[in-house]
Amino acid sequence: MRILITGASGLLGINLALEAAAHHEVYGTAKDHLIHTDRFRVMPCDLLAPGAVERLLDQTQPDWVIHCAALANVDACEANPVLAQQSNSDLPFLLATHVARGGARLVHISTDAVFDGQRGLYREEDQPNPLSVYARSKLEGELAVAAANPEAIIARVNLFGWSPSGRRSLAEFFFNNLNAGKRVMGFTDVYFCPLLANDLAAIFLMMLQKKLRGLYHVVSRECLSKYEFSLRLAQQFNLDSSLIDPTSVEQGGLTAARSPRLTLRVDKLAEALGEPPPDISTGMHRFFDLYQQGYPRWLKGMAGAVTPTDHG
Ligand SMILES: NC(=O)c1ccc[n+]([C@@H]2O[C@H](COP(=O)([O-])OP(=O)(O)OC[C@H]3O[C@@H](n4cnc5c(N)ncnc54)[C@H](OP(=O)(O)O)[C@@H]3O)[C@@H](O)[C@H]2O)c1
């Protein structure tokens, strides 16, 4: 199969492109952060430029498209709502429309943050209530994709993993600071169910192979607070957990509103795939194994970000 992955320079996109490239022919787009690799074909492009989506699909002729590109930084969306709307709503609509016309299959990536997090344990049919510019733009993107391309898979995710910048995921934040002996806050009242990006990649490929369609929650089967997550990471990497201050999100000084209980049910996915997604410990073990294999440094090398003093 030929797979086009948008946002292949980002946290999810690069891990997905590398996993998929082991079995498929992969094209991956990058905009500001070029990736240097022979594992997949890198397509430099700004997807918001006029005609870019049409040109890209024409050049690559994919069987499958996995749309990871987004303005995914919550505070950047708050600062630039117009760009958030263009990147997270208008672009997915355009892509979904053209993919539907060309006959390829689409996976569109959305977020757990479409919910307000007051209740938790959300199912796919529960009513979203986004709190931030980012979350609103992502929900609009979901609705636009579903309208333009009813065959598309829309996957609400949350993830952690190693990124080309070494700074993109929450797990890297905790690892970088604890490894440097710095104190960090761990929110005790914000819950989530993150999957390792590499495991998420394998699940997407299974979803495509099984020809699923429609909305799915694609997160870990286990949920925990961000504080508990930081403790698990410290334990896995044998780092000093006394550097983590248990803190309420109210004291965190964050710009955009965060949903406190973003716990999602994965029954629909488990039934469709015949098995539930991995728990946090499984993902954390693999995150550690990847570290031991030098994977973070390999990724940084692809981004041209390795320096002689970089031991990441
Ligand atoms: N990270 C999380 O914890 C999380 C949680 C829930 C949902 N999600 C969703 O998962 C998806 C991937 O997130 P991520 O964390 O991997 O994001 P990321 O690391 O910030 O990567 C975003 C990617 O989008 C690309 N991009 C942005 N605007 C573009 C444009 N106009 N044209 C072409 N490419 C563009 C970026 O390219 P350059 O960097 O090269 O400019 C980058 O490759 C997003 O849909 C996000 O909403 C993420």
Image (cartoon, helix red, strand yellow):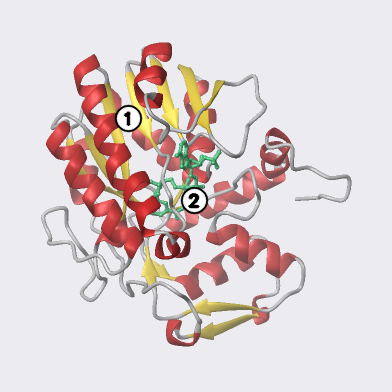
Placement of the N terminus among the 4 image quadrants: top left
x and y, in percent, of residue 208 in the image: 29, 27
Q: Residues within 10 Å of mark 2 (few under 14, many from 20)?
A: many
- Looking at the rendered structure, the number of numbered marks drawn on it comes to 2
Residue occupying image coordinates x 39% and y 51%: 83
The yes-or-no answer for disc 2 within 8 Å of ligand 1 is: no
Viewer-side residue, 265 vs 35? 35
**Residue 206: which disc?**
1
Q: Report whether 29 appears left or right of 105.
A: right
| Amino acid type of the residue tagged 1 in the rendering | Met
Residue occupying image coordinates x 48% and y 44%: 197
Q: Report whether 174 appears left or right of 121.
A: right
Check disc 1 and report its element: helix, strand or loop: helix
x and y, in percent, of residue 33 in the image: 61, 38
x and y, in percent, of residue 172 in the image: 61, 58
**Residue 239: which disc?**
none
Q: Which residue is mark 2?
A: 283
| Amino acid type of the residue tagged 2 in the rendering | Gly
Residue 238 can be seen in this image: no
Q: Quadrant of residue 245?
A: bottom right
Viewer-side residue, 263 vs 63? 63
Viewer-side residue, 5 vs 147? 147
Q: Residues within 10 Å of mark 1 (few under 14, many from 20)?
A: some
The yes-or-no answer for disc 1 within 8 Å of ligand 1 is: no
Identity of the residue furthest to the front in this view = 50
Lower position in the chain sequence, tag 2 or tag 1 = 1
Residue occupying image coordinates x 30% and y 33%: 107
Q: Is residue 7 above or below residue 70?
A: above
Q: Quadrant of residue 103?
A: top left
Check disc 2 and report its element: helix, strand or loop: helix
CA distance separating discs 2 and 1: 18 Å
